[in-house]
Image (cartoon, rainbow, N blue to C red):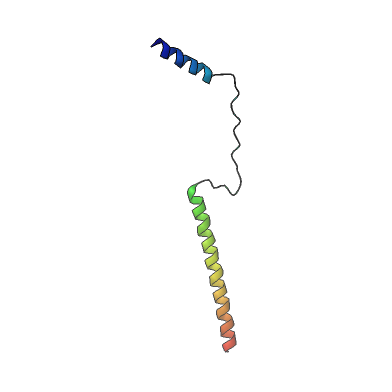
């Protein structure tokens, strides 16, 4: 039992040595980093809405051109 106590004390002392802690990297705070998992989904939804609007606008423009040609 004394041996186990001595070994535990040695491990504790080794863990508390005078080594400085390892430097931690700064977290990136760029616009590409998402704060929450659903933020990426919201961006995808917005992109899909934008594509839909563009497709509808192009379809409307094409309909106008066809209507003008048939008149």
Count numbered badges in the picture. 0
Outermost residue toward the front? 3
Outermost residue toward the bottom? 71
Residue 41 vertical placement versus 3 (above, below): below
Q: Position of residue 42 (x, y in %)?
A: 50, 55
Q: Position of residue 37 (x, y in %)?
A: 48, 48
Q: Residue at x 53, y 59 (%)?
A: 46
Query: Looking at the rendering, which quadrant does residue 51 occupy?
Result: bottom right
Q: Residue at x 58, y 77 (%)?
A: 61
Residue 10 vertical placement versus 60 (above, below): above
Q: Residue at x 52, y 62 (%)?
A: 48
Q: Residue at x 55, y 76 (%)?
A: 60
Can you say which quadrant of the picture contains the C terminus?
bottom right
Q: Residue 27 or 1: which is nearer the viewer?
A: 1
Can you say which quadrant of the picture contains the N terminus?
top left
Q: Position of residue 6 (x, y in %)?
A: 45, 12
Q: Position of residue 27 (x, y in %)?
A: 59, 39
Outermost residue toward the top? 2
């Amino acid at each position: 039992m004394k041996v186990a106590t001595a070994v535990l004390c040695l491990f504790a002392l080794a863990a508390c040595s005078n080594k400085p802690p390892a430097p931690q990297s700064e977290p990136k705070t760029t616009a590409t980093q998402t704060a929450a998992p659903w933020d990426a989904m919201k961006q995808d939804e917005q992109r899909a809405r934008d594509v839909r609007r563009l497709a509808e606008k192009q379809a409307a423009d094409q309909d106008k051109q066809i209507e003008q040609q048939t008149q």
